[in-house]
Image: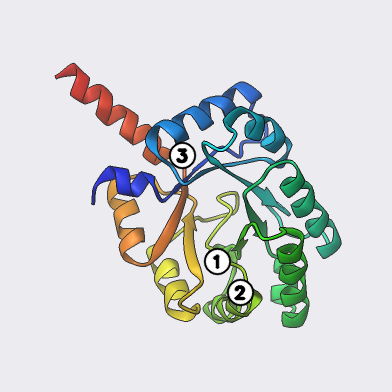
Amino acid sequence: MDIKEILSRCDHTLLRVDCTADEIRSLCDDAIRYGCASVCIPPAHVAGAKRYVGDRLKICTVIGFPNGYSTPVVKAFEANDAVKNGADEIDMVIDLCMVKDRCWDRIADEIDRVRRACEGRLLKVIIECCLLTEEEKIKMCQIVSASGAEYIKTSTGFSKGGATFDDVALLRAHCAPEVKVKAAGGISTIEDAERFIALGAERLGTSRIVRLAKEAEKAEEAE
């Protein structure tokens, strides 16, 4: 697969807790240069990033991140605030406590509240696969499929594991056809990115693919 096609599926990501405005602007510059789908950044940087890029790039941010245990009211407020600040896409973390307690209706209500707060912006639901059983993952596929959210996402990248090939295959197999899959966390090679896409991932949450593209450019220039 051509690296440009892979890059077009990447949410170029910087969610480090101490990232600076300069780093965010550099992230945006790289995402524009390499044709990424979006940048995924902390909520506090959304307004500044949107002013910086205008309509040249989609801005994605995270809600209830990374633990997911803030209340639905708080998550909905966060999402709406992000939209008002210029976010084009919202990646929300579900309440994993509710999953473990099998409070399926409450999880569905939480996603619905956030979806409505997004005011039509694209919503990705992070289910943190590394903390779930297979049964719980399948149940979340069913809930997300019924929710109206556009994506189900494997991981925050801040827990004990990131995206796996098995998880992406499982999510693709059990979600409705219109629900897309985002793989995130630990995607470090072009080969891995290609395999995630082949298994059904429409988006990849990663910063490393752009780095690899830069390294390939430098190698070509040195020849």
Of the residues shown, which amino acid type is indicated by label 1?
Answer: Ile
Residue occupying image coordinates x 70% and y 75%: 100
Above or below, 101 against 198 in this view is: below
| Front-lying residue, 123 or 171 | 123
Q: Specify few, some or many for label 2: CA neighbours under 10 Å numbering under 14, 14-19, or 20 or more.
A: many
* Residue 36 rendering spot, x and y as whole percentages: 43, 42
Residue 216 in which image quadrant = top left
Above or below, 215 against 110 in this view is: above
The residue at the far left in this view is 223
Q: Find the distance from the CA under tag 3 to the CA under tag 1.
A: 19 Å
Q: Secondary structure at mark 1?
A: strand
Residue 144 numbered mark, or none: 2
Residue occupying image coordinates x 46% and y 46%: 37
Label 2–label 1 contact, CB within 8 A? yes
Residue occupying image coordinates x 75% and y 78%: 101
Q: Is residue 169 left or right of residue 100?
A: left
Sequence-first tag of 2 and 3: 2
Q: Find the distance from the CA under tag 2 to the CA under tag 1.
A: 7 Å
Sequence-first tag of 2 and 1: 2
Q: Is residue 145 left or right of residue 168?
A: right
* Residue 18 rendering spot, x and y as whole percentages: 67, 29
Residue picked out by circle 1: 152
For the residues carrying marks 2 and 3, which lies nearer the camera in this image?
2
